[in-house]
Amino acid sequence: MKKLLFIYLLLIGLFVLYIYNYQAKSSVKRAWNDYELVGNMDETYVMVTFMVGIDYWKRALKGFEDAAEALNVSIEYRGATQYDVHEEITVLEQVIAKNPAGIAISTMDPERLNPVIDKAVEAGIPVVMFDADAPESKAYSFLGTDNYKAGVEAAHKIAELLNKKGEVGVITLPHQLNHQERTQGFQDTIFMEYPEMKVVSIKDGRGDPVLSKEMAETMITENPNLAGIFVTEANGGVGVGQTIMKNNLQDSIKIISFDTDKGTLDMIKDGVISASIAQGTWEMGYWSMQFLFHLQHGIFEQNHKNEPLPRYVDTGVTIVTKENVQSYYPQ
């Protein structure tokens, strides 16, 4: 009798454990479904840049599109056709007037778009910055390269190529924050770590291949011992490469460029550009979309006890050389 009672109690206990486990799993499943990251196609998120026709934005836009597809929402891509801050302000004003679900912005000026960015946030539109920040604005987050560190990486690479000695120059966009940081990282590293090297010239290429080509010509003429040039963006890198080819200086002047557009990759493959700093542009677009969706739906606050989104996310860099360039071409 006692043995039979023990068996009954054991069976009842196992049944209770089964019911408890089933209920727990159902509860977790319901909680997960409550926060399922799915929107609807009526939600439109907008990416805003400048110089919309250039290759550089393609991977960032692809990341934005991929995240939107996963979240079941719509996107638009808008921007200034030229390197013109007034045009970008106008475009952003037009976007705000349509009251989108969120805006991801890359700005050519760290300050001048602040009033318009703040206007969007104050109107209840989530805004994140990517690629180029406006740190004093009310945007919730910045997703992009640690540009100072990218400049440091460029300095180490050019020092390696030049056996840690020689004169170098920089062609950049001196009024854009991300390029200021790249230039500063490069300068500081050369000054502090390579005593037999010197930055002898810094010029404004305005992100234009023709102007950057002219600036490289001037830099070489003014500095006959120039051994290397760091170009902080891709269009300028191609322009400088054209100057090097025109003057047959491939063996005497090393170029470190930025990004992975086809022109840059082709010049690396041909030995005109020695290396390029590749940014995580797909990651910038993808996580910008994710952050905006979280802000729009309040998911982050619900799941993380009202902690804000991170103000800064480093999307990382890699160095492209002749040895690994093939892997950076679109597959």
Image (spheres, grey):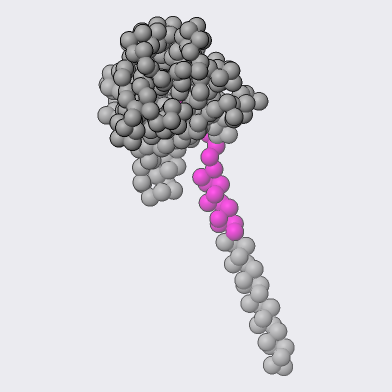
**Residue at 69% of width from left, 88% of height from top?**
5
In the image, 99 versus 289, the foreground residue is: 289
**Residue at 37% of width from left, 37% of height from top?**
312
With respect to residue 240, does 16 lie above or below?
A: below
Q: Quadrant of the N terminus?
A: bottom right
With respect to residue 16, does 324 lie above or below?
A: above
- Residue 221 lies left or right of residue 37; in this view the side is left
With respect to residue 15, does 266 lie above or below?
A: above
In the image, 199 versus 233, the foreground residue is: 199
Q: Position of residue 8 (x, y in %)?
A: 69, 83
**Is 92 one of the magenta-colored residues?**
no
Q: Which residues are magenta?
A: 25-45
> Image quarter for residue 38?
top right
- Residue 101 lies left or right of residue 17; in this view the side is left
Note whether residue 331 is visible.
yes
Q: Position of residue 34 (x, y in %)?
A: 52, 46
**Residue at 36% of width from left, 46% of height from top?**
307
With respect to residue 104, does 34 lie above or below?
A: below
Q: Position of residue 186 (x, y in %)?
A: 35, 28
Q: Position of residue 246 (x, y in %)?
A: 50, 6
Note whether residue 44 is visible.
no
In the image, 27 versus 68, the foreground residue is: 68
In the image, 149 versus 201, the foreground residue is: 201
**Residue at 68% of width from left, 87% of height from top?**
6
**Number of numbered discs present?**
0
Q: Quadrant of the C terminus?
A: top right
**Is 26 one of the magenta-colored residues?**
yes
